[in-house]
Image (spheres, rainbow, N blue to C red):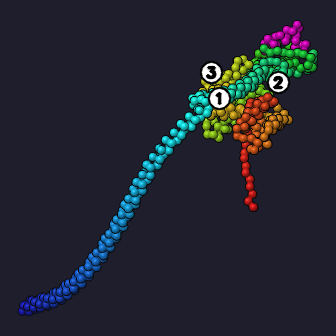
Amino acid sequence: MEVLFFVAGLAAGIGGGFLLRKTTEERAMSDARARSEALLRDATAEGEQRKRELLTEAREENLRLRQEIDKEVKDRRNEMQRAERRLEQKEENLDRKLDALGRREEELKAGQEALKRRMEDVDSLYTEQTRKLEEVAAMTREEAQQILLAAVEEEANHRIGVRLRELEEKAKREADRKAQEIIATAIQRTCVEHTSEAAVSVVPLPSDEMKGRIIGREGRNIRAFETLTGVDLIVDDTPEAVTISSFDPVRREVSRRALERLITDGRIHPARIEELVEKCYQEVDQEMIDRGENALLEAGVKNMHPELAKLVGQLQFRTSYGQNTLMHSLEVAHVAGIMAAELGVDEALARRAGLLHDIGKAVDHQVEGPHALIGADLARRYGEAPDVVNAIASHHEDEEPQTVHAVLVAAADAVSASRPGARRESLEAYIKRLEKLESVANSFHGVTKSFAIQAGREVRVMVAPHQTDDASIAKMAFDIARKIEEEMKYPGQIRVTIVRESRAVEYAK
């Protein structure tokens, strides 16, 4: 029974719970349905409101776009109207210009006809005047032309004769100057007394008794010495000195050394002379090689033929106007290299050509011809570049310079030779030469001032503009140059520059 009551109670509880749950679910569903309907109504109302707003915005945007389009159409219509007005104005201007051109063309035609009639009148008048002139002169036009041509021809022949005479005189002067240069060069190469500076060496003796020992019995010592060295040994009345004379500087140097050693040694006989001369030849030969290599090193020159380098060293024993030729060549190499570097051209080539420019002087006593051409031939023979050969050959204008290096070498050579103190010329003589140069220029009429510049290589002359004209200054420059040639002695050449300047001065008060 208890079990039955328990089961019945359990069943009643379950049923009551089920009914309570069902009632609760129905109430929740009713609430959810009511909320859904409220949300739907709210969404519908909001959608209608949004729809009305969008329609309003669309109508406003449509109105704005229509206004903009109307304004743009109106602006374009106005622009087209302005363009049409401009075109109409251009057409009117073009019509006016065409009318003006038509009138101008008619005026030109009328002018041409008037000019044609005027030319006919002039021709008839010219013909009439010619006829009257022929009647007055009693000759035809052709006869008058012949007489005029004859007069002109006579005047032209006279001027040609004057010009030819001037050219002939100039050629004679140039020939005289060139002859003097050739004679001076020939004298320098020969062994004569008045060229002792360049071809003579003096050896001091301890006493005059040494002269007899140098001559030897029946002159055998002096004959052996002259035969072995190829020089002239002059033993004269000069106290305690003998003179060695030779055109070959190497022979002269070998002889000087050998004679000094013989005097110091005291044993003077043919065998000893031969031994010392041979030894001195070897020493001088080695010294030439060493000096040549040192010169190449100092000038920065590389890859030179050994024989050519030896000839460079031989220049140590050669002088020109008292200036050591090797030192002069090194100076020219440095100056040419500096100028080449400033101009942006090959510096090494300029130094090489500058060092070799006087190489012909090493053998010019053995080979006939100008030392520039001799040196060019030597450089060509020993494989130097054509530019170097041309620079050597043209540095004294024996050939035309073909490269800028040739011009630089010639300029550097002139600078090295003409600077004060480079050659055997005292300061007083140098100043006197400059003063003489200025006085020669000042002696001409119309010259106000003159200035010797560039170490006497140029004289600049200032002339009075009211006393001269442009045509006369050319002749004055020619006359000054000729007078300098006649009255002065100088190395190289002197440039004469005349300056004529006109000035007008006024003062504002």
Highlighted range, magenta: 211-229
Q: CA distance from mark 2 to mark 3?
A: 32 Å
Q: Is residue 271 above or below residue 170?
A: above
Question: Is label 1 or label 3 in front?
Answer: 1
User: What's the amino acid at mark 3?
Assistant: Arg
Mark 2 neighbour class, 10 Å CA radius: few under 14, some 14 to 19, many 20 or more = few
The prevailing secondary structure element of the residues shown in magenta is helix
Q: Is residue 227 above or below residue 100?
A: above
Residue at 70%, 18% (x, y): give it: 368
SS state under label 1:
helix
Residue closer to the observer: 73 or 500: 500
Given contact means CB atoms under 8 Å apart, are the residues at marks 1 and 3 in contact?
no
User: Which quadrant of the view contains residue 343?
Assistant: top right
User: Which quadrant of the view contains residue 147?
Assistant: top right
Image position, residue 470 (x, y; %): 70, 40
User: What's the amino acid at mark 1?
Assistant: Ala
Q: CA distance from mark 1 to mark 2?
A: 63 Å
Residue closer to the observer: 143 or 348: 143
- For residue 381, the mark is 3
Image position, residue 184 (x, y; %): 77, 23
Image position, residue 180 (x, y; %): 76, 23
User: What's the amino acid at mark 2?
Assistant: Glu
Residue closer to the observer: 130 or 55: 130
Figure disc tally: 3
Asked if residue 394 lies left or right of residue 62, the reply is right
Image position, residue 286 (x, y; %): 72, 22
Question: Is label 2 or label 3 in front?
Answer: 2
